[in-house]
Image: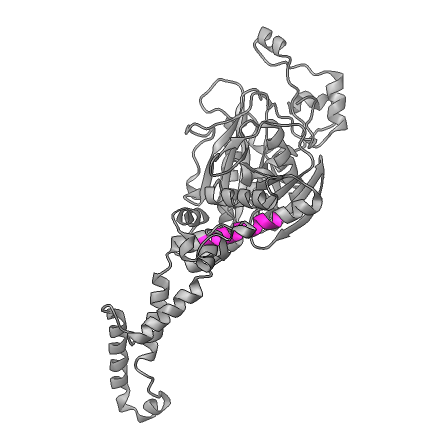
Amino acid sequence: MSGDHYQAEVAIEDREDDATQQATGRPRTMTSTAEIDSTITHPGSVRINVKGAFIVDTPEQPGTPANPSGSGGNSYHETKDIRLPNHTAIISHIAVDIGGSLAKLVYFSREAHSTDPGGRLNFQSFETDRVDDCIEFMRHLKDKQLALNGSKPGELCVMATGGGAYKYYDRIRQRLDVDVLREDEMECLIIGLDFFITEIPREVFTYSETDPMHFASPNANIYPYMLVNIGSGVSILKVSGPRTYERVGGTSLGGGTLWGILSLLTPAESFDEMLDMAAHGDNAKVDMLVGDIYGTDYGKIGLKSTTIASSFGKVFRMKREAENEAEDTGGLSNGDDQNRRQEQQTSQQTSDQATSTQAQAQQPQQPPQARPTSSRASELARSRFSSADISRSLLYAISNNIGQISYLQSQVHGLSRIYFGGSFIRGHPQTMNTLSYAIKFWSKGEKQAYFLRHEGYLGAVGAFLKHQPRNWGRRSSFETAR
């Protein structure tokens, strides 16, 4: 892509002349007057040399020291670091996007134990409920700043976005004793997405069951498009140009909904555990399908027999069947030792209370089988639905809802390219397939759903790129910033 900055106005370090670089064996260090003037004209950006950038797919160690012990198992290091082999400038800031469920951290580091130039962008996430672990990790980065980037610990700056940038602003400043610059959440999302679309190879892809990951080449002609950012809730943005956007819709049924409901219905303790259960579940045991109603496809309106007619639609019927079965067996069947023990305990308690006439009068005798029957019915109903089946059913319900709302918004605003971001997706095949199928089905193939390998870090990357050097705009400061 030509020019000193790409379309989101996030400045990219000028591509050195290949012949000059090959001849000298080192990057060009001089700066022309035109470049300085361009820098003054387009302030508010960090200059990053993305020439030759690529995603690190090998399971090598990240370019940063080990996590501090305080973070324990509550954080997740994203293995898909982005290698920037030609970036030589000092970077003395980190960026964090603190949402309702997750805090996403982006920071730059040199290659550990290497004399090669360049470095990499590292990606780390924490549960927002454990935001103190995230702050502790940032303190660790501050202490290691000299080794990581060549800057001094006192020079560290935190670029913060998301709701947590305001909620935890004072806490971050007090704990780290650094400057904290808060950036607009929606603007950071767009800047981050534009960066990934235009600059990073093998980042953006389409998904289908027959072609699971088909990469789209970086493209300069990206506008207009729609971004569906799925975090705790969902925001839908129409993007018409560089930093030209509007929020056109959304829904409160997002990742936080899935996480919350499955926390009530399953023993899962983390979002990733819920997604793993969903991957092994069978929603047909919970959902009412078109085939359950018609016995076959409903071809006239294009519905397959496997299409979901009603999410969780089988639950009420199977619960009623379980209640009928419990009534037929008197609440005791299949050697129900648990109910027998409950009856024995109730009998013993009644015997102990026999000495008190008043207590007996205040506690009228209950039908002996009523409670066991109800308990047995609930037990039978629960036994017919596994946590994995419930997880998959709810995942489909929320994903289908988001997919259809996204299509309707794209139709209203005449947009054919729809990018899905946010930490809800997590590269989960069922989620991507559901969203992609919804867009393709409702648009009759005229619209395309796109996904990103760093879908959860759009805001954090956008905030990272918005950093403004302390002396920005002074002619003597340009080389220093580099």
Query: Which residue appears at 24% of the width and 77% of the height?
Result: 344
x%, y% of residue 73? 41, 44
The image's colour scheme reads one colour
Q: Where residue 248 appears, x then y in whole percent?
A: 69, 48
Residue that lies at the very extreme toward the bottom in this rendered image: 357
Q: Is residue 327 left or right of residue 421?
A: left
Residue 182 location, x and y as percent? Answer: 65, 42
Give above or below for 265 relative to 102.
Answer: below
The residue under the point 51% across, 37% down is 207
Give the magenta part as a residue range: 393-406
Q: Is residue 287 visible?
A: no
Query: Is residue 204 in view?
Result: yes
Examine the rendered structure and indicate whether residue 398 appears above or below residue 123.
Answer: below
Instruction: Out of 3 and 33, give the one closest to the viewer.
Output: 3
Q: Residue at x 56, y 46 (%)?
A: 438
**Residue 5 percent location from the top left of the image:** 69, 26
Q: Which is nearer the eye, 181 or 237?
A: 237
Give the answer, above or below, for where 381 lies relative to 57. below
Chief secondary structure of the magenta span? helix
Q: Residue furthest top?
A: 23
Q: Is residue 166 magenta?
A: no
Asked if 153 appears above or below 406 in the picture, the reply is above
Query: Which of the two residues, 176 or 211, is positioned nearer the viewer here?
Result: 211
Q: Is residue 399 magenta?
A: yes
- Please identify the quarter of the rendering in which residue 226 is found: top right
On the rendered structure, is 382 left or right of 128? left
- Quadrant containing the N terminus is top right
- Tell me if 481 is positioned left or right of 212 in this view: right
